[in-house]
Image (cartoon, grey):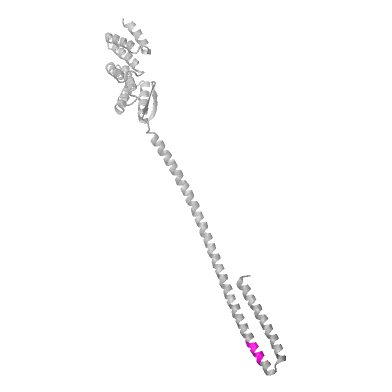
Amino acid sequence: MSLVDIGATTMMRRTASLLLFCCWAASAAAGVFDDDEARKAILDLRQRVDAVRSLAEQGASRAGDDNAAVRRSLLDLQNQIEVLRAETAKLRGANEQLSRELADIQRRQKDMAQAMDDRFRQFEPVKVSLDGRDFMAEPSEKGDFEAALTVFRKGDFAAAQALFLDFMKRYPRSGYGAVALFWLGNAQYATRDYKEATINFRALIAKEPEHPRAPEAVLSIANCQIEMKDTRGARKTLEDLLKAYPQSEAAAAAKERLARLK
């Protein structure tokens, strides 16, 4: 029961008690006073009772009105709570959707970043180990050299010459430079272009005299001279090879050739 209901009930109880008291008082007065005085006292009491009853009824009416107002307020508050619950559920759903969309965006960004890293990695220099030498080369540089060497090994020496010449023009400071000269010279030797082969073998020796391919280049020069019937020049080249690279495998081959030239 609400406070308003309790107050109204209490007021009605007090009014009833007061009415009973007034009736008792009227009866008692009838025995003490005479008839006129008793009637006057009774009328006065009745007026008071009517006044008290009117006040009680007004209080009960006001209590009823207050109770109805409280109930309306509670109903309005309940409606507001339901509206807030609906809005909260709607916001929670929107938040979950945003969370899913954010996760999708983050996953796509991660995939894009990985793709960019992979793409950039294709252009990053790579370490190359060739003929006992280590150096850095661009991926395209490494690919072009290997492509030219593959053509050479297939026996297409003319095409290999063109590829090695193009390679040296495109990468003049390449770590493959000396090796490219060596294989270019061999391709030219295979096509019997001994003069150009000799030029490129000498370029290799001048560029990197300590390169592992240098002794072979000297031996190849001697072979070109032999093919061009320059026996004296070939002998001189072989003797220089024995002096410059006495411990090399090419030096052992040079001794055999010298023996045949005498």
Q: Position of residue 112 (x, y in %)?
A: 42, 41
* Residue at position x 33%, y 7% in the image: 258
Can the viewer see residue 45?
yes
Q: Nearer the viewer, residue 141 or 133?
A: 133
Q: Toward which corner of the image does residue 39 lie, by quadrant? A: bottom right
* Residue at position x 44%, y 42% in the image: 110
Relative placement, left or right, of 102 versus 41 is left
Q: Position of residue 211 (x, y in %)?
A: 35, 19
Residue lying at the far right in this picture: please name it: 31
What residue range appears in magenta? 40-47
Q: Position of residue 152 (x, y in %)?
A: 35, 21
Q: Main secondary structure of the magenta part?
A: helix
Residue lying at the far front in this picture: please name it: 32
Where the C terminus falls, by quadrant? Answer: top left
Q: Toward which corner of the image does residue 228 lie, by quadrant? A: top left
Relative placement, left or right, of 142 versus 103 is left
Residue lying at the far top in this picture: please name it: 262
Q: Nearer the viewer, residue 57 or 195?
A: 57
Q: Nearer the viewer, residue 72 or 141?
A: 72
Where the N terminus falls, by quadrant? Answer: bottom right
Q: Toward which corner of the image does residue 75 lie, by quadrant? A: bottom right
Relative placement, left or right, of 201 versus 8 is left
Relative placement, left or right, of 257 versus 33 is left
- Residue 242 lies in magenta, yes or no? no
Can the viewer see residue 229?
no
- Please determine whether, in this image, residue 188 is positioned above or below residue 119: above
* Residue at position x 40%, y 39% in the image: 116
Q: Position of residue 36 (x, y in %)?
A: 67, 95
